[in-house]
Image (tube, helix red, strand yellow):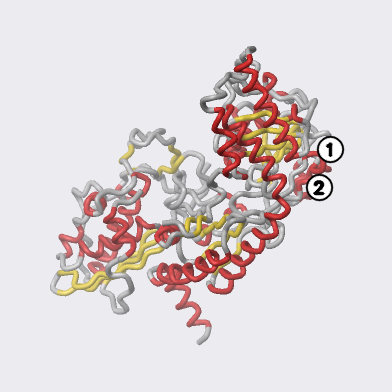
């Protein structure tokens, strides 16, 4: 049963127009874009159309867009490809503590190859300190990678300020805009970035399609060697239907962004205000104002996220959590820990990501349902019992 | 992900709560690994007259606590000490492999409560010799932090679930490679 699917960060259904646009490319227009003949050229044209649509979404030139298979691949290509291609200048990289794991693990890989990394901290709202970042820069720094918006807490970073800093020092700046693109305005020339990752599944496009923007003239070493697809920067037969879908989704996202945002923000604020009002001992995670329009995230003290998710799911509400028990690796979210949230509190992580089609009544249903689930779990929590005893002692 | 039995115990946990005048209390877990359990026991004529628990943790942790309390109630102390994580998992129709450690916690918390009772009685603490599943740090047996398989001293890779391992220099327990803090003692990992 689904009453409120509030895990849009994880997956969203395709927009109907996207789905319809993709269909012909599975069978009727099955060509390989590398073929010279007319069947192949149809596929090649479709890819170039999509490239233009994606370029329009981020205000880049079409030939600055490289299609890849996922946001993780885009980040891998950006980090490894830019570091390897530009190592003659130096081998120092700077990232933040709350980057996506695809960035953090790429950096770990590069460290094994002799690169050095500085990880800059974030404040309690998950914002990177620009002055701390400035201190981290060295003459041999070649690449800075700071995400535009965080997928777990929704915080938006001061990208423009960081890019100015990097420009002054001639350092390449990559931003992982996977959670941002299609949800907030993303304009590469305004942002002043040299590289930017985005993924179709974050704006009602298909899974399996993503892109890396690389500014003209910036050197990049490919990670997949082979044919001359994507101008030699990413070999492998193109996933034509997915790329077509990404293009159409990008166009829809660009055109509807303004009208969607106001509605979705009001739903988000309804959740944030409602949860803070109806549940005690809860904190809003991430920045209160500088956050993604669809993103409401919390830590509910004394209880654990997976248990909350299971109860919510049975009530028809799907959400996410960064608790250790929810993750397959049994690790608490590195983002929450980096924001100074302790392990026990991080266990109560709960994340809602909405959609502009979400109805206010469904949000109200969530606000009605959540408090009793929280109370039920707290009633069996030894931490809550301790909290009540401490409260009693304080009050006499 | 979970069996019907696990979900049933998670949604309707038996014996939740505290016993104010408990004869023994056993607390296990820490917030770093995610789960904390407290078991309370009441003993009469060598039997567990009442067992209650409080749990901070995931669905598996709550279901395991509930199952352990149900299995233990009415048993003699000796019988209750023989409740192992394997038995608890079996009774629940199985647990996902990365949740097996939750069942350890349940049995451990119960055993700790019994041990505390026995200490208070001035009796020697039952030695749980012969219980393979006993995995206290003192017992020296090492387990995979992910799937709970028993590991040899020098393991670098878990032979069952294939994760890479790193040992905590502080307590000696295995953690997953890449972890920053130890799941068992919270110490920083190098």
Above or below — where is A359 with respect to A327? below
For the residue pair A372 and A300, the one nearer the viewer reads as A372
Q: Where is residue B165 in the image (x, y as percent from the top left)?
A: 43, 37
Quarter assignment of residue A143: top right
Chain identity of mark 2: A
Res. A306 visible in picture:
no
CB under 8 Å between discs 2 and 1: no
Please indicate whether residue B189 sits to the left or right of residue A153 in the image: left
Question: What residue is shown at x 62% (from left), y 62% (from top)?
Answer: A268
Looking at the image, residue A212 lies above or below residue A316: above
Relative to residue B101, is residue A21 drawn left or right? right
Q: In which quarter of the image is residue B81?
A: bottom left
Residue A52 visible in the shown view: yes
Q: Where is residue A92 in the image (x, y as percent from the top left)?
A: 72, 33
Q: Is residue B37 above or below residue A328?
A: below
How dense is the environment of label 2, judged by Cα within 10 Å: few (below 14), some, or many (20 and up)? Answer: few
Q: How crowded is mark 1: few (under 14 residues within 10 Å), some or many (20 or more)?
A: some
Q: Which residue is located at x 63 percent, y 47 percent?
A: A98
Q: Which residue is drawn at 39% across and 45% down?
A: B145
Asked if both marks, 2 and 1, belong to the same chain, the answer given is yes
Viewer-side residue, B37 vs A4: A4
Q: Position of residue B170 (x, y in %)?
A: 46, 48
Q: Mark 1 points at which residue?
A: A167
Label 1's element? helix
Q: Name the residue under label 2.
A: A161
The single residue placed furthest to the top in the displayed view is A36
Tell which subunit mark 1 falls on. A
Q: Is mark 2 on a helix, strand or loop?
A: helix
Spot occupied by residue A20 in the image (x, y as percentages of width and height):
57, 37
- The residue nearer to you, when weighing B108 against B69, is B69
Q: In the image, what residue occupies the spot 44% across and 35% down?
A: B164
């Amino acid at each position: 049963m689904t009453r409120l699917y509030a895990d849009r960060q994880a997956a969203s259904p395709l927009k109907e127009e996207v789905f319809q646009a993709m269909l012909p490319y599975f069978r009727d227009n099955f060509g390989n874009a590398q073929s010279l003949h007319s069947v192949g050229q149809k596929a090649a044209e479709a890819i170039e159309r999509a490239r233009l649509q994606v370029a329009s979404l981020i205000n880049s030139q079409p030939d600055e867009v490289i299609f890849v298979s996922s946001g993780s691949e885009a980040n891998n290509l950006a980090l490894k490809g830019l570091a390897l291609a530009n190592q003659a200048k130096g081998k120092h990289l700077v990232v933040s503590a709350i980057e996506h794991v695809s960035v953090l693990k790429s950096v770990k890989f590069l460290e094994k190859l002799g690169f050095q990394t500085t990880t800059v901290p974030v404040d309690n709202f998950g914002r990177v300190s620009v002055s701390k970042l400035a201190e981290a820069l060295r003459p041999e720094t070649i690449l800075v990678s700071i995400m535009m918006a965080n997928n777990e807490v929704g915080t938006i970073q001061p990208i423009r300020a960081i890019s100015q800093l990097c420009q002054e020092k001639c350092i390449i700046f990559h931003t992982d805009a996977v959670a941002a693109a299609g949800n907030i305005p993303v304009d590469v020339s305004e942002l002043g970035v040299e590289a930017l990752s985005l993924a179709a599944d974050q704006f009602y496009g298909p899974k399996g399609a993503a892109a890396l923007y690389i500014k003209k003239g910036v050197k990049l070493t490919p990670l997949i060697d082979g044919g001359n697809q994507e101008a030699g920067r990413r070999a492998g037969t193109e996933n034509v239907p997915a790329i077509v879908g990404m293009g159409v989704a990008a166009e829809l996202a660009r055109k509807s962004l303004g009208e969607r945002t106001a509605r979705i923000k009001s739903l988000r604020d309804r959740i944030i205000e409602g949860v803070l009002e109806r549940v005690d001992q809860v904190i809003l995670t991430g920045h209160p104002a500088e956050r993604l329009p669809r993103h409401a995230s919390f830590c509910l003290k004394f209880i654990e996220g997976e248990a909350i998710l299971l109860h919510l799911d049975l009530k028809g509400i799907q959400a996410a959590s960064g608790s250790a028990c929810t993750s397959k690796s049994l690790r608490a979210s590195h983002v929450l820990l980096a924001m100074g949230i302790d392990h026990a509190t991080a266990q109560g992580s709960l994340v809602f990501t909405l959609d502009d089609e979400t109805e206010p009544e469904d949000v109200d249903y969530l606000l009605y349902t959540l408090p009793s689930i929280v109370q039920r779990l707290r009633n069996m929590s030894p931490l809550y019992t301790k909290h009540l005893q401490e409260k009693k002692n304080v009050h006499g | 992900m979970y069996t019907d039995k696990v979900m049933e115990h998670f949604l309707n946990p038996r014996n939740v709560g505290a016993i104010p005048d408990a004869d023994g209390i056993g607390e296990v877990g820490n917030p770093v690994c995610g789960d904390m359990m407290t078991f309370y026991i009441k003993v009469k004529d060598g039997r567990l007259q009442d067992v209650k628990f409080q749990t901070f943790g995931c669905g598996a942790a709550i279901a395991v606590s509930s199952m352990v309390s149900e299995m233990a109630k009415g048993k003699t102390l000796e019988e209750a000490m023989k409740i192992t994580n394997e038995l608890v998992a079996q009774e629940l129709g199985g647990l996902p492999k990365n949740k097996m450690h939750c069942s350890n916690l349940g049995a451990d918390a119960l055993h700790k409560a019994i041990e505390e009772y026995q200490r208070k009685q001035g009796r020697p603490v039952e030695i749980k010799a012969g219980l393979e599943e006993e995995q206290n740090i003192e017992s020296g047996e090492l387990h995979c932090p992910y799937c709970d398989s028993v590991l040899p001293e020098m393991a670098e890779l878990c032979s069952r679930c294939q994760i890479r391992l790193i040992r905590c220099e502080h307590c000696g327990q295995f953690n997953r490679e890449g972890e920053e803090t130890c799941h068992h003692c919270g110490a920083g990992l190098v």
